[in-house]
């Protein structure tokens, strides 16, 4: 498929244009190829040189990432960024990005998959981010300890970056926002949630969670955001009939 055909598919599926005014990421094609057809797409969390090299070695013609290279303002093409762009162009590798649209999607998004792993039922949108709710909350199918929640969302045996058992031993309700959403714990407190799951913790939210009796689990920014791109990797083969591969480049953060 040509890159524009792939763009039309993902732009429609993930509703990229709905996020034009709320997401600083340049969602969609960030770097195009020379017009060649793409026979394989590599999926990854981050647009970094290691990801690009492994995508090229795998024979991919496009790499789809959650965290792209461009974030809402002009930047100088020098240093590390120049090196990344130079590699993409020399290897005719197109770069595609989907940030908040991939967090928020009700089926293929990071938060939807995490909600499924935790068995959150009766899901409702949760977590305002620039006026859009990108996470989910609801009741857990069965009461769940914070330790069991950490085990369920662990990717490839990764340990959470932070476990804060400040509330109930068994949780009945849960809210989820992947990645760097520590401060949205305030919204979890305001909405009476037992357990808040995100990627990163923050010093400035610690005492608020403690004093409010909120259980908070920081599963890791990377580890909570592998799920959307992995889900799309599976979809790619069935819907686009294109070879697809997930590239795992963990940061431990």
Image (cartoon, rainbow, N blue to C red):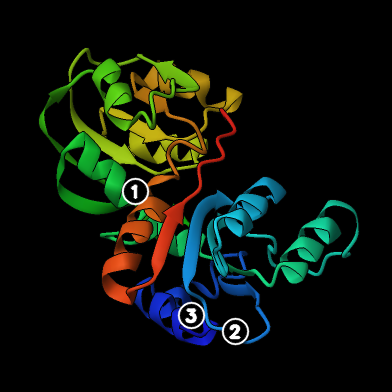
Question: Going by the image, does 18 lie left or right of 111?
Answer: right
Kindly check if marks 2 and 1 are in contact, taking CB atoms under 8 A apart as contact: no
Kindly identify which numbered label has been placed on residue 7.
Answer: 3
Give the foreground label among 1 and 3.
3
Dot 2 alpha-carbon crowd within 10 angstroms: few under 14, some 14 to 19, many 20 or more: some
Query: Marks 2 and 1, Cα distance to the nearest angstrom?
Result: 34 Å
Q: Is residue 23 left or right of residue 108?
A: right
Classify 10 Å Cα crowding around label 1: few (below 14), some (14-19), many (20 and above): many
How much space separates mark 1 and mark 3, taking CA atoms?
Answer: 22 Å
User: Horizontal and vertical percent for residue 244?
Assistant: 41, 61
Q: Nearer the viewer, residue 16 or 91?
A: 91
Q: Where residue 149 sits in the image (x, y, percent)?
A: 27, 25
Residue shown at 77%/64% (left/top)? 85
Residue 160 position, x and y percent, is 44, 22
Task: Report the side of 219 relative to 141 (left or right).
Answer: right
Residue 6, located in which quarter of the rendered image? bottom left
Marks 2 and 1, the one that precedes in the sequence: 2
Can you tell which quarter of the image residue 153 is in?
top left
The disc label shown at residue 27, or none? none
| Viewer-side residue, 174 vs 211 | 174
Q: Nearer the viewer, mark 2 or mark 3?
A: 2
Q: Name the foreground residue: 74 vs 59.
A: 59
Mark nearest the camera among 2 and 1 is: 2
Residue 96, placed above or below residue 145: below
Give the labeled residue for mark 1.
Answer: 111
Q: Do labels 1 and 3 touch, CB within 8 Å?
A: no
The C terminus, quarter of image: top right
Q: Which residue is mark 2?
A: 36
Sequence order check, earlier mark of 1 and 3: 3
Viewer-side residue, 225 vs 134: 225
Q: Position of residue 66 (x, y in %)?
A: 52, 56
């Amino acid at each position: 498929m040509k890159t524009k055909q792939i763009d039309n598919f993902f732009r429609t599926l993930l509703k990229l244009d709905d996020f034009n005014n709320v997401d600083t990421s340049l969602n969609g094609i960030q770097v195009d190829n020379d017009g060649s057809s793409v026979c394989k797409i590599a999926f990854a969390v981050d647009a970094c040189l290691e990801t690009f090299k492994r995508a090229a070695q795998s024979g991919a013609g496009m790499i789809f990432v959650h965290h792209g290279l461009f974030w809402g303002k002009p930047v100088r093409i020098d240093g590390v960024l120049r090196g990344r762009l130079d590699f993409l162009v020399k290897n005719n590798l197109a770069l595609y990005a989907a940030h908040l649209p991939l967090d928020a999607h009700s089926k293929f998004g990071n938060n939807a998959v995490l909600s499924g792993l935790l068995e959150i039922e009766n899901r409702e949108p949760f977590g305002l981010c620039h006026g859009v709710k990108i996470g989910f909350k609801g009741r857990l199918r069965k009461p769940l300890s914070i330790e069991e929640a950490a085990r369920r969302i662990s990717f490839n045996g990764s340990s959470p970056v932070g476990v804060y058992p400040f509330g109930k031993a068994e949780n009945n309700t849960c809210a989820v926002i992947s990645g760097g959403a520590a401060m949205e714990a305030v919204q979890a407190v305001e909405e009476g949630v037992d357990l808040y799951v995100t990627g990163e913790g923050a010093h400035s939210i610690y005492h608020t969670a403690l004093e409010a009796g909120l259980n908070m689990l920081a599963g890791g920014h990377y580890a909570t955001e592998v799920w959307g791109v992995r889900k799309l990797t599976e979809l790619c083969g069935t819907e686009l009939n294109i070879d697809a591969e997930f590239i795992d480049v963990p940061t431990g953060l």
